[in-house]
Image: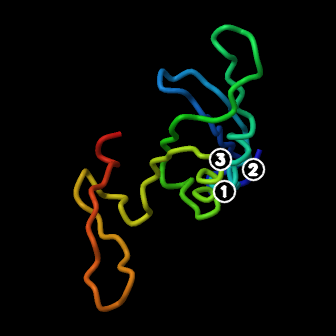
């Protein structure tokens, strides 16, 4: 149990596969930051091989999360593990498939636009 503005609360962090079956879960206090739980969830994943022989799969093919898990450390960890991911940027919260502005590499160039995939999830 964790203390929050609404009283004593908890959060359930769940990592599920495409059909909704749970691969890993963690229960934390309500005041705990979401972003700190992603690496622990990834470490807890163990998917058995279809044949039943060999060690469990630990690496996901693709990960789609909400923006609460979009810290630089989480993105770096996913790249190091070789996991493709879709995590919306914090400034694209109201986006419904419209282009978002990417940061320009220099201050003299206008920002590039890239399509937002958050409307297609």
Residue 65, compared with residue 49, is above or below; it is below
The residue positioned 32% from the left and 49% from the top of the image is 117
Q: CA distance from mark 2 to mark 1?
A: 11 Å
> Which element type, helix, strand or loop, lies under badge 2?
strand
Q: Which residue is mark 1?
A: 33
The residue positioned 26% from the left and 51% from the top of the image is 96
* First along the sequence among labels 2 and 3: 2
In the shown orientation, is residue 55 left or right of residue 15? right
Q: Which residue is mark 2?
A: 2
The residue positioned 72% from the left and 27% from the top of the image is 46
In the shown orientation, is residue 55 left or right of residue 11? right
Of residue 91 and residue 116, the one placed in the foreground of this image is: 116
Q: Which image quarter: residue 50? A: top right
> Which element type, helix, strand or loop, lies under badge 3?
helix
* First along the sequence among labels 3 and 1: 1
Of residue 90 and residue 7, the one placed in the foreground of this image is: 90
Q: CA distance from mark 2 to mark 3?
A: 31 Å
In the shown orientation, is residue 26 left or right of residue 101? right
Of residue 71 and residue 52, the one placed in the foreground of this image is: 52
Name the quadrant of the C terminus. Answer: top left
* First along the sequence among labels 2 and 1: 2
Of all residues shown, which one is farthest toward the front?
54
Residue 20, compared with residue 114, is above or below; it is above
Label of residue 81 in the image: 3
Of all residues shown, which one is farthest toward the top?
51
Of badges 2 and 1, nearer the viewer stands 1
Q: Are marks 3 and 1 in contact (CB under 8 Å)?
A: no
Q: Are marks 2 and 3 in contact (CB under 8 Å)?
A: no
Q: Position of residue 14 (x, y in %)?
A: 62, 35
């Amino acid at each position: 149990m964790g203390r929050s503005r609404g009283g004593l609360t908890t959060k359930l962090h769940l990592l599920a596969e495409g059909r909704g079956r749970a691969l890993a879960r963690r229960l934390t206090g309500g005041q705990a930051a979401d972003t700190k739980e992603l690496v622990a969830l990834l470490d807890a994943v163990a998917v058995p091989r279809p044949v039943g022989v060999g060690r469990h799969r630990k690496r996901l093919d693709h990960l789609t999360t909400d923006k609460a898990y979009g810290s630089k450390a989480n993105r770096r960890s996913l790249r190091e593990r070789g996991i493709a991911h879709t995590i919306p940027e914090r400034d694209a919260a109201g986006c419904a498939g419209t282009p978002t502005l990417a940061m320009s590499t220099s201050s003299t160039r206008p920002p590039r636009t890239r399509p937002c995939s958050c409307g297609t999830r």
